[in-house]
Image: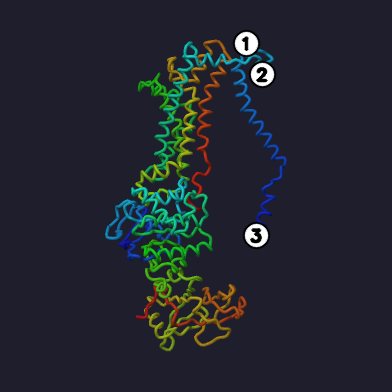
């Protein structure tokens, strides 16, 4: 196992910058998820680490070697592809043996390692089958086996679960997590599903438009998103963002909405708003940090219910606040009708404030 | 469990399609097409085992009264002059067609792979330039190519034919093969390269076996094209000992009056290599060889 360092990594296609000065360190034995919407550069970044495409500038270090110009085969990596990429003409056994044969291991050692990998992944009885005779989950397992049979320094995984059905995906998710814990493997895992990143990774790198937005533990990214993109991308349902205006009444900083209400802020939040470049401030809140009231209470703002979605144990209410949709969760016992006038109270401790111009999170100090 | 049963029940009527007028029309059309292609060949076979006199009779003998293999014996006998000529034409054709096929595969495989996998300046232009030749009827190039061949001293050599057939066959071979390579997921090569193969090894060990049906289809296509070609062979070659079968048969029998059983026997022997090629190689035309490689 080894650590991986990306330093000012850039990949351009003509004038299009697919990956923009991405720098991050993956520690030895760490599980890092690259997450972001499609086209954000996460798969390109992974392919750069794998050596499948040449880098434009920057450095990639695996272990203690700069691998910028090394062939994929010399980087001591293994990769699991989104579509598995099993060799269709080879049996499962030969698929698993291929990386070992390429490294010219003696035949008896190949057999021993393949059988061991098959045992670990519980597919000993599948060894003689061809990939097309396997189910999606089994193919996925073979792809994983082909990666681990060689004991590489780093595992690269490119959306390995996205082709599985929902139930199998949850099952494989915990298997991959278990696999990481048992092997203490260094894993770089690309996914567009923020839930996979949050549940599996030690740290997650959120990317957008080729830029690394935030690189931190899932809990930290969830609790302290650095900008509006990360705030809206991580968490399901997404964090609600309401553009408001900052103003001063009686010497206090308040936020005012389009319906002329004003929201007083805690001293800490007021300090944050004071640091905004302009008067434009965006209030961010997750559904669970908002309280729904049927009548005006101090510190609440008026809203109009739009849709009501019961999911069983909680009901989601989408309501308009100052022209923006806000998602609130309420116990199913509370009945809200569409178009009903309601009041929302935001938790001052857990609300997020963003600069309306720069879209960056505002800090108190 | 109940959902499975329901699906099966719902699937039943769809599988047993109603046999309506269109379906019958289609079947009758297919039967007609089979007769249309098979009858001339059957007649060829029947005529080839008749005597010369029986072949000329009218009304025709639907089944030969006295079947004889005399025509075949004559054609395949290296002792008499007819057999000598025929066998020489046969080997000439075999040589020209095999050489064309091998060269066309050797050139088309890397070319098609490059067009499919690499981006390089002028890629699209080159790809369409390759097809340009096929936008014109072959006859147009007859005189220019003849002049060209004479200038480089290839007239009356098999080389002139091989080169010419390549100009016809290669563009389509490249086009055909590129289609096959496009359908082989690039991730297979990437996986192989990560698994320790060089780019070339990934191509040889992983891509080549998967493109075998494509290569075989391309090879058969080139072979048949070269084997049957008449106009260029007729124009470029004038020496009797160099003729290929299509020209040879034609010339040979107009000289020896019209020996229909002999002509039909020669035609039958000429179609044997193509049929054998198909029969031997058809098992490689396995549908969806890459099935199971990747999940879509």
Picture layout, residue A72 above or below residue A302: above
Numbered disc in front, either 1 or 3: 3
Contact flag, marks 2 and 3 (Cβ < 8 Å): no
Spatial separation of the CA atoms under disc 2 and disc 1:
14 Å
Q: Which label's residue is closer to the chain start, 2 or 1?
A: 1
Tag 1, which chain?
A: B
Tell me if I can see residue A50 in this picture.
Answer: yes
- Tell if the residue under mark 2 belongs to the same chain as the one under mark 1: yes
Element marked by disc 2: loop
Which quadrant of the figure has residue A32? bottom left
Residue at image coords 37%, 80%: A364
Residue under pointer 3:
B3
Q: Nearer the viewer, mark 2 or mark 1?
A: 2
Q: Which mark is residue B53?
A: 1
Q: How far is mark 1 from mark 3, CA to CA?
A: 73 Å
- The disc placed on residue A268 is none
Q: Earlier in the sequence, mark 1 or mark 3?
A: 3
Where residue A110 appears, x then y in whole percent?
38, 51
> Mark 1 packing: few (<14 Cα in 10 Å), some, or many (20+)?
few
Crowd rating for badge 3 (residues with CA inside 10 Å; few <14, some 14–19, many 20+):
few
Classify A225 as above or below A40: below
Give residue A196's position: percent from left, percent from top. 46, 66
**Helix, strand or loop under label 3:** helix
Nearer-the-camera pick, A175 or A222: A175
Furthest residue in direction bottom, as rendered: A250
Residue at image point 62% right, 23% down: B42
Q: Is residue A19 left or right of residue A325?
A: left
N-terminal of the pair, mark 2 or mark 3, is: 3
Query: Is residue A299 found left or right of A66 in the rendered image?
Result: right
Determine which quarter of the picture holds residue B126: top left
> Mark 2 sits on what residue?
B63
């Amino acid at each position: 196992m080894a650590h991986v360092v990306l330093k000012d990594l850039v990949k351009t296609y003509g004038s299009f910058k697919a990956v923009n000065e991405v720098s991050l360190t993956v520690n030895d034995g760490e599980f890092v998820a690259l997450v972001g919407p499609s086209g954000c550069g996460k798969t390109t970044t992974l392919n750069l680490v794998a050596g499948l495409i040449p880098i434009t500038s920057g450095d990639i270090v695996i272990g203690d070697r700069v691998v910028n110009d090394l062939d994929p085969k010399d980087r001591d990596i293994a990769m699991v592809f989104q579509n598995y990429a099993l060799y269709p003409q080879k049996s499962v056994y030969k698929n698993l043996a291929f990386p070992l044969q390429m490294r010219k291991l003696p035949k008896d050692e190949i057999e021993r390692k393949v059988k061991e990998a098959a045992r670990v992944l519980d597919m000993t009885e599948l060894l003689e089958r061809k990939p097309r005779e396997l189910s999606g989950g089994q193919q996925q397992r073979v792809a994983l086996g082909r990666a681990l049979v060689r004991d590489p320094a780093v595992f690269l995984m490119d959306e390995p679960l996205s082709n599985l059905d929902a139930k199998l995906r949850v099952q494989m998710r915990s298997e991959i997590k278990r696999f990481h814990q048992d092997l203490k493997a260094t894993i770089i895992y690309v996914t567009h599903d923020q839930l996979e990143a949050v549940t599996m990774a030690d740290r997650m790198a959120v990317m957008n438009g080729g830029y690394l937005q935030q690189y931190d533990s899932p809990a930290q990214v969830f609790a302290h998103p650095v900008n509006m993109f990360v705030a809206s991308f991580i968490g399901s349902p997404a964090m609600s963002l309401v553009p408001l205006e900052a103003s001063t009444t009686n010497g206090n900083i308040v936020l005012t909405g389009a319906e002329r209400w004003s929201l007083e802020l805690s001293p800490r939040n007021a300090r944050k708003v004071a640091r905004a470049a302009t008067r434009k401030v965006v209030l961010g809140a997750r559904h669970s940090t908002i309280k729904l009231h049927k009548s005006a209470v101090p510190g609440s703002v008026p809203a109009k219910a739009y849709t009501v979605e019961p999911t069983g144990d909680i009901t989601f209410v989408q309501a308009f606040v100052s022209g923006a949709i806000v998602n609130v969760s309420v116990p199913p016992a509370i009945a809200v009708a569409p178009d009903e006038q309601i009041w929302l109270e935001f938790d001052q401790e857990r609300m997020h404030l963003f600069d309306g111009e720069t879209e960056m999170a505002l800090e108190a100090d | 469990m109940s959902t499975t049963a329901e699906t099966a029940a719902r699937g039943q009527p769809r599988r047993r399609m109603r046999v309506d007028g269109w379906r019958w029309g289609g079947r009758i059309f297919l039967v007609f097409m089979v007769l249309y292609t098979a009858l001339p060949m059957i007649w060829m076979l029947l005529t080839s085992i008749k005597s010369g006199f029986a072949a000329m009779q009218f009304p025709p003998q639907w089944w030969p009264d006295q079947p004889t293999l005399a025509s075949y014996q004559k054609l395949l006998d290296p002792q008499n002059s007819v057999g000598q000529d025929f066998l020489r034409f046969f080997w000439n054709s075999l040589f020209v067609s095999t050489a064309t096929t091998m060269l066309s595969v050797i050139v088309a495989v890397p070319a098609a792979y490059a067009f499919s996998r690499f981006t390089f300046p002028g890629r699209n232009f080159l790809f369409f330039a390759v097809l340009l030749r096929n936008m014109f009827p072959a006859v147009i190039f007859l005189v220019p190519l003849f002049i060209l061949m004479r200038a480089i001293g290839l007239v009356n050599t098999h080389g002139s034919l091989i080169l010419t057939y390549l100009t016809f066959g290669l563009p389509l071979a490249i086009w055909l093969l590129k289609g096959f390579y496009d359908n082989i997921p690039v991730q297979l090569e990437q996986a192989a390269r990560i698994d320790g193969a060089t780019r070339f090894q990934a191509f040889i060990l992983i891509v080549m076996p998967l493109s075998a049906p494509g290569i075989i289809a391309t090879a058969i296509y080139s072979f048949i094209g070269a084997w049957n070609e008449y106009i260029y062979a007729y124009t470029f070659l004038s020496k009797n000992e160099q003729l290929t079968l299509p020209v040879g048969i034609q010339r040979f029998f107009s000289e020896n009056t019209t020996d229909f059983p002999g002509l039909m026997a020669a035609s039958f022997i000429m179609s044997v290599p193509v049929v054998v090629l198909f029969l031997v190689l058809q098992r490689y035309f396995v549908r969806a060889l890459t099935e199971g490689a990747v999940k879509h």
